[in-house]
Image (cartoon, helix red, strand yellow):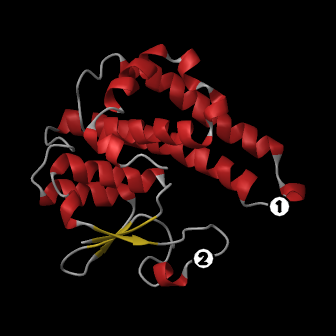
Amino acid sequence: MKIYYSVTSPFVRKCLVAAHELGLRDRIELVDASAHPVTRDRGLVALNPLGQVPTLVTDEGAVLYDSRVIVEYLNALADGDLVPEDPDARWGVLVEQALADGITDAALLTRYEVAARPEALRWGEWIEGQLDKVACGLADLERRASAFGDRVDVGTISFACSLGYLDFRFASLAWRERHPNAAAWYEWFAGRESMVATRPG
């Protein structure tokens, strides 16, 4: 299998953490790709018209995207339990993934506004709106985190990768100060081998 990736992408990291947890990491080749929102990587676009990472090419040649689909595929391939079979547990975990991905999406849009858009064209209210999504998402994560225990599934992996991205790109948010439950849980989860091995440098 091949994953087209960027080393700093939190969505790529989610897939690689899942692959580590499922014992599949050694079966995946990493292929460097540029997922810039303006200067599009035409080699990547030829596989994935959205030109986004992660994009997975299976051993059979099927092309899968985005991270949610890829993690589901890897979980099925390994007969894993990152996505529970029990319906109630499944929907709960998938909602957690959606919330975590929404936090990450808002952070990425903020990053693009600052790093990719010319300064004269930047929209302050847009940035404020995206960061408010991050803040509201973190408040909900704080409510949930004390019940996570030692769960390792697509919900908790998604939250961990989102928080890791905030540390990497938005350290000034100092999210731990207002979210002690999430901070305590993340300190434990971030120490997992899968998280350490995929930490952006």
Quadrant location, the N terminus: bottom left
Name the residue carrying label 1: 118
Q: Nearer the viewer, residue 98 or 10?
A: 10
Tag 1 and tag 2, C-beta contact below 8 Å: no
Query: Amino acid type of disc 1?
Result: Pro
Residue ID at (55%, 68%): 35
User: Tag count in the figure?
Assistant: 2
Residue ID at (60%, 29%): 135
Residue ID at (51%, 73%): 51
Judged left or right of residue 31, residue 73 is left
Query: Amino acid type of disc 2?
Result: Arg
Q: CA distance from mark 1 to mark 2?
A: 17 Å
Q: Which residue is at the far left? A: 79
- Sequence-wise first label, 1 or 2: 2
Instruction: Give SS at disc 2.
Output: loop
| Above or below for 195 versus 38 | above
Q: Count neighbours of disc 2 (C-alpha within 10 A) and say few if under 14, some if 14 to 19, many if 20 or more.
A: some
| Above or below for 123 versus 100 | below
- Residue 116, how many percent across, how many down? 72, 61
Q: Nearer the viewer, residue 89 or 155?
A: 155
Q: Count neighbours of disc 1 (C-alpha within 10 A) and say few if under 14, some if 14 to 19, many if 20 or more.
A: few
Name the residue carrying label 2: 40
The image quadrant that residue 60 belongs to is: bottom left
- Residue 28, how many percent across, how many down? 25, 66
